Amino acid sequence: MKAYATWRVMRRLRRNAERNPRPRTYTRNARVRVRAAADFLTWLAQQGLPLSDCRQADVDTWLSTAASAGGVRDFLA
């Protein structure tokens, strides 16, 4: 999770801030993505599944039941 937030989300956030220094929704989008990833990992833990054992059927189940499902796409990619 820390690697995802640091190397994917924060890198994109910094790159966007360099291009356009005015505050926008970049930070909100970053928070949504990190929160969705955390929610997904929490759900996996509640199911007793490590991320390495997660299968497409598990992802499909979570996507159909979670409110923050759309934000996890970036983490899963």
Image (cartoon, helix red, strand yellow):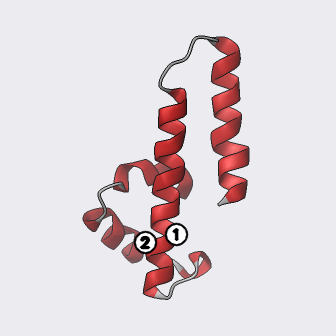
Disc number for residue 32: none
Q: Which residue is mark 1?
A: 41
Is residue 55 among the parts visible in the rendering?
A: no
Q: x%, y% of residue 57?
A: 37, 76
| Residue located 51% across and 84% down the image | 49
Q: Against 5, is 58 above or below?
A: below
User: How far apart are labels 1 and 2 at the CA level?
Assistant: 14 Å
| Residue located 40% across and 69% down the image | 59
Say left or right for 26 vs 68. Answer: right
Q: Which residue is mark 2?
A: 56
Is residue 72 among the parts visible in the rendering?
A: yes
| Disc 1, SS | helix
Residue type at tag 1? Leu
Q: x%, y% of residue 65?
A: 26, 67
| Disc 2, SS | helix
Indicate which disc, 1 or 2, sits on the residue closer to the N terminus. Answer: 1
| Residue located 73% across and 45% down the image | 7
Residue at the farthest bottom position:
48
Q: x%, y% of residue 27?
A: 54, 32
Say left or right for 68 vs 2. Answer: left
